[in-house]
Amino acid sequence: MTTLVVHPASRPLAGSVPVPADTEIALRAIAFGALGQGTTHVAGLPHHDAIVALGRVLRALGVGIDPASASEWRIAGVGRRGLVAPSVDLDCGDSMSAMALLCGLLVGQHFRSNLTTGGSLSGADLTELVAPLRLRGGLVASLRAPHGATLGPPLAIGPLPEGRTLSPLEHEADLADPHVKTALLLSSLYADGPTIYREPHVSSDHTERMLTSLGAPIHTIGTVVRVDPAGWEGSWPAFRATVPGDLSAAAILVAAAQLVPGSRITVRGVATNPTASGFLDIARDLGAGVQIEAHGETLGEPVADLHAWCGATRAAVVGGEALERAMGDLLAACAIAALAPGTTRVRTVDAGSQALGATAALLGAFGVECTTEPDGIVMHGRAAPLSAANVDGAGDPRLAMTACVLALAAGGPSRVRNAGSIAAEFPKFVATLRALGAHIDVEP
């Protein structure tokens, strides 16, 4: 069990650093490279179990993948219709994103595939993901409970009978779920008519952006996405791309800069997709010093350097669509609010979630008065320094990383136990903070 001993910052954090690549973008780059015409080169891949799982599945489907290194793959594209029947079950690991991508790609194939999972996903209810695929004629069944009311993995997908294609579909989602949207949009590439997808608000649009950049017939207006294969030649060329950095990893470093007076850091090459960058808006609302230096796009994704410094933070009300777009970055935002004078309120429909309770407990351990309410949590920012703490990372990498950042502003050394999970999300997290000037000891 890894324990990190984080000492209070004795000097400002300073420097220019990268962060791990965005896994969601990387998964799509690999999958769409596999369906391209020619050899695709994808660099900057993160060291993540989901990447390994997707690569293993695509090889089983006949795609040639030649890793030049762990972070750079050459992918021999087989085209949209070039996947072959697998001889083994397809293990998606514990990745819902990989599951959604593969469901969308395999439901239109004329062979059968069995998709298996592991970890927390093994008990998931995939009914919302599978139902729209069935509505358009896709054959998807649960092998776990074939006659049950819910659909869970492992799943049997296909085969679509020879001579049949998926039908057109107009679908209105009750919830904005990027996994459901991804599966349906990919299945639309195998349909014989248009697909129209409506969601209550725009969820992360990595799939739409990348498909559009590759020339797929996809058009978006607000919360409506339309795919119409009529007149489309049905293919896209191979490409070269370097996956941009993960904004969630960058958010932790931006928070660190706010908590240590005099700090000024740059996080290089970060994906700043507006549908997934609500953290940046929340950080500004809290008075954080943060500036975006745009550097164009990669596969439709805006990429930028983030410049962060210790700003004059203030309390704010956090909620609405900015919080929806913040994804899993609420912890980093709450770290900024810890030293923001006044009362910060986080309003969310998911107020009773375990994550909010863990957030309140973490802040409380560092001496921040924090309570949960029916509509969210309330934090009373305090003056520095925070209280030194001895906390359990509980196997949650973002919780453990946030604890490390809060510890930089504490009055004495803090211990973050059970912090080994950080390596799965940010392998060089400790080294990065050290490079910026932090003093962290690692105990096995």
Image (cartoon, rainbow, N blue to C red):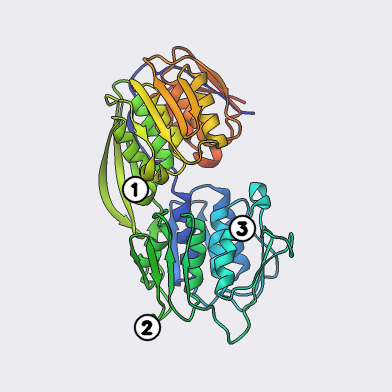
**Type of amino acid under label 2:** Gly
Residues at marks 3 and 1 touching, judged by CB atoms closer than 8 Å: no
Task: Describe residue 4's horizontal placement relative to residue 145 as left or right.
Answer: left
Residue 272 - label = 1
Q: Single out the mark in the foreground, 2 or 3.
A: 3
Q: CA distance from mark 3 to mark 1?
A: 29 Å
Residue 126 - label = 3
Local SS, label 2: loop
**Type of amino acid under label 3:** Leu
Looking at the image, the residue that sits furthest to the top is 411
Residues at marks 2 and 3 touching, judged by CB atoms closer than 8 Å: no
The N terminus lies in quadrant: top right
Q: Which sits earlier in the primary sequence, circle 2 or circle 1? A: 2
Q: Position of residue 124 (x, y in %)?
A: 64, 52
Q: Position of residue 58 (x, y in %)?
A: 58, 65
Q: Image point 57% across, 59% down: which residue?
A: 128
Q: Residues within 10 Å of mark 3 (few under 14, many from 20)?
A: some
Q: Which sits earlier in the primary sequence, circle 3 or circle 1? A: 3
Local SS, label 1: loop
Local SS, label 3: loop
Q: Single out the mark in the foreground, 3 or 1.
A: 3
**Type of amino acid under label 1:** Thr
Q: Image point 52% across, 47% down: which residue?
A: 47
Task: Describe residue 199's horizontal placement relative to residue 310 as left or right.
Answer: right
| Residue 279 versus residue 212 in the image, above or below | above
Residue on which disc 2 sits: 231
